[in-house]
């Protein structure tokens, strides 16, 4: 407890800086809370596929997934996020969220998005995990991991099963009128009335 008190004495504002430090700290906390709520960051803690369309660029991927065979039994996270333990799951979700926020904010996403190596490994492992019986009893493809396929130059699941679950039409311009559950607007009703002229 003494070390904690010493640390606090070291960092706490001295003299006339105490009141401005409280105001600045409060402003940062307020901005963080506002950003957390308006960006719907809390929704990313769930496995709800509708969370993915918080970003409009994900609409084609949501629409093609929804109409695929995987749309009935698997969520986005079932395929795209590691399922080996909770720490790894939320760690990768956090990394992906940070990366997506940076890419989408800067508008540097590709027309047809592809998985990065970390996510490709999760995809392959999850294909093998869900299709264990098929991969171990009937065919030998599931006996090799994504890393092994990279080392020997072999094929991964989606090299043959390209149409599952997003079909070949999965670029940003391939499904422009896709019906997806877009999130509600964060604009307050009173401000919407003022800006729309109603």
Image (cartoon, rainbow, N blue to C red):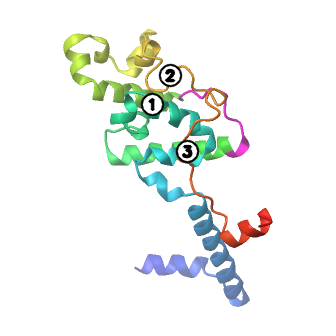
Residue 2 falls in image quadrant: bottom left
Q: Which residues are magenta?
A: 105-115
* Residue contact at pointers 3 and 1, CB within 8 angstroms: no
Earlier residue among tags 2 and 3: 3
- Asked if labels 3 and 2 touch by Cβ distance under 8 angstroms, the answer is no
- Decide which of tag 1 and tag 2 comes sooner along the chain: 1
Secondary structure mostly seen in magenta is loop
> Considering the numbered disc 1 on the image, is that residue within a helix, a strand or a loop?
loop
Q: Is residue 128 left or right of residue 29?
A: left
Residue ID for mark 2: 167
Label 3: how many Cα within 10 Å (few below 14, some 14–19, many 20+): some
- Give the mark toward the camera: 3 or 1: 1
Q: Position of residue 53 (x, y in %)?
A: 55, 45
Q: Residue at x 50, y 48 (%)?
A: 51
The residue at the far bottom in this view is: 15
Q: Are marks 1 and 2 in contact (CB under 8 Å)?
A: yes
Q: Residues within 10 Å of mark 1 (few under 14, many from 20)?
A: few
Which residue bears the numbered disc 1? 67
């Amino acid at each position: 407890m003494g070390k904690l008190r010493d640390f606090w004495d070291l960092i706490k504002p001295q003299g006339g800086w105490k009141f401005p430090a409280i105001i600045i700290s409060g402003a940062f906390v307020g901005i963080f809370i506002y950003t957390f709520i308006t960006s719907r960051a809390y929704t990313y803690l769930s496995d709800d596929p509708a969370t993915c369309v918080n970003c409009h660029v994900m609409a084609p991927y949501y629409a093609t997934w929804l109409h695929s065979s995987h749309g009935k039994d698997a969520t986005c996270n079932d395929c795209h996020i590691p399922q080996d333990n909770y720490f790894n799951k939320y760690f990768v979700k956090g990394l992906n969220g940070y990366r997506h926020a940076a890419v989408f904010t800067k508008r540097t996403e590709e027309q047809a998005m592809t998985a990065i190596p970390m996510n490709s490994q999760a995809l392959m492992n999850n294909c093998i995990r869900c299709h264990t019986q098929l991969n171990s009893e009937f065919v030998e493809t599931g006996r090799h991991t994504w890393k092994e396929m990279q080392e020997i130059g072999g094929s991964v699941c989606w090299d043959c099963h390209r149409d599952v679950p997003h079909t070949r039409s999965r670029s940003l311009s391939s499904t422009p009128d896709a019906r997806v559950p877009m999130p509600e607007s964060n604009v307050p009703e009173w401000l919407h009335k003022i800006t729309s002229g109603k």
